[in-house]
Structure formats: C-alpha cells, structure tokens
Amino acid sequence: MNRVIGAVAATFIAMGSLALTPGTASAWCVPNRGSYPQDLWTGWLRSGIYPGQQVSIQAGVREYWPYVSNTSVVSAWTMLDDTTGNHNYAQIGWWAPDKNNEHFAVCQSKCMFIEISSNGVSTHIDRHDLLQPTDATTYYLTSYLPASQTMVFYYNGNLLWQSYAISWAPNRFNALAETHNYADQMPGAVQSHHYFYNSQYYDGSQWRDLNWDGQVTPYNSNSYYFGAAEVPDVHHNVEVWDGGCPGT
C-alpha cells in the first residue's frame, strides 16, 4: 500500500465512525409494475473537475435485499465517472442478480461488486464472500490516483483492488441505486427508505459532504415511480425509495 492510498484509507475509517442508524430499510416487496427492460437510477450526482488531483467518493450504503425480476439485477454503489467519454466509470457497491442473470453463478442472490469501464471495455469483479447482512451499513469508497492513473476500491476501510492504468479522469461523483427493469424494486420503500450515510467526496485537498453547498444534483430516472431526497439538514445523507412499495 503506497502512502497516498494509505491516507485515503485512514480518512475512510474515520468517517465510518459517523454512521447513523435509522429504522429498518429491508422492506422487500414486488412493486407490481409490468416488465419493461430499461436502465434506471435514483440518488445523487455532483459534478467537479480537479485536474491532476486525487478525487474520491465514499458512502455508508445500507445493505438491502430487493425484489429482482427475471434476468435483471438491482444495485447501490458509489462511483466516479467521466461524462465526456464513452462509458468511462468506476464503481463499488452491492448488487442482487436474479437467478437467471449471468452473474448469479458467482454472486449468488447478492454480493459485493467492483466494475470499471474505459471506453466501453469493462472489468467486473463479484465477491460473494464479502456479503454483509441485510440492514448492515457497508462503507464503499472509489478513488482516482492521478500519479498512476488508476482507480482504487475500498470496502469497510480495506483496499480490495487497484485497477490498471486508465486513459480518463473523473469529473463527477455518484451515490446511486440502480435497476434494469421497471418490474424491479428500486431499493427502499415509501415508509422505510434506503440510505447512503456520510456521502462525501474528496476534492484533492479535503473531504466535504456531498451536498455541503446545496449544489448536488438529485437524479431520478422516473420521479413518478422512484424517490430521492436529502435527510433534512444532514448534507451527507441521501435516501431513496420505490414508490410502488409502501413499506412498514
């Protein structure tokens, strides 16, 4: 572990001690929408360009066990991406594939995953052995190291993988939940939201709450079905939910 990576890990562990613990988020349900394959997201985005700087995104993501439709997958993660390129992104989080999804053989019904894509060519890692219990909080961090032009991925403060050199630099920070079919359940329910705790980004000099200045962009593929909101007066906690699931 080099000195730069070690510094990120130390900050990451310290931030982990700040986790909140609201009510249960494990309100699994079938949202009763017809099957219509489409990539769908809800959560937070923040743009930022810091040339030549190490940048990072971290969050304590609530582990969830959603309903997943045939062949689909549901996930929640932190990500750095390059909006000027062709499918340039790096992400770490949990995901839950359906039993007929190609990732089920390794991932089983839920696992931790890492994925990086450069110009549409991707590398994917599934780790079922790192699965955490439902409603646990797992800290996921994605960081870009400009000196080596690599991405590093942390899981609860532990370095899991450092990527090969990439040809792009990130310009956006993401804390999002994702589905791939309208029949899937977006993590969370109306009365029991799914949470991203302590969502923060590193801009090369300091860690900041993701929405410290009110400039975060709430992102929602379909606000009729899904929701995303900031926990009132807590600029680093975002909650998401599926409007088709009432929860308890």
Image (cartoon, grey):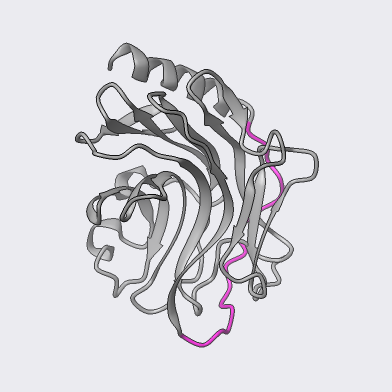
Q: Residue furthest bottom?
A: 34
Residue 208, how many percent across, how many down? 61, 28
Q: Is residue 55 above or below residue 171?
A: above
Q: Is residue 63 visible?
A: no
Residue 27 included in the magenta stretch of the image: yes
Residue 88, how many percent across, how many down? 32, 49
122 and 109: which is toward the camera: 122
56 and 160: which is toward the camera: 56
Instruction: Report the span colored magenta.
Output: 19-35
The image quarter containing residue 146 is top left
Residue 187, how many percent across, how many down? 56, 61
Q: Is residue 100 left or right of residue 15?
A: left
The image quarter containing residue 162 is top left
Name which residue lies at 50% across and 78% down. 182
**Helix, strand or loop for the magenta stretch, by majority:** loop
Name which residue lies at 37% across and 79% down. 70
Q: Is residue 198 above or below residue 244?
A: above
Q: Residue furthest right?
A: 233
Residue 60 included in the magenta stretch of the image: no
Residue 40, how many percent across, how many down? 49, 68
Report the label total.
0
Name which residue lies at 33% across and 76% down. 71
* Quadrant, the N terminus: top left
Name which residue lies at 67% across and 42% down. 215
Q: Is residue 159 left or right of residue 47?
A: left
Q: Is residue 102 visible?
A: yes
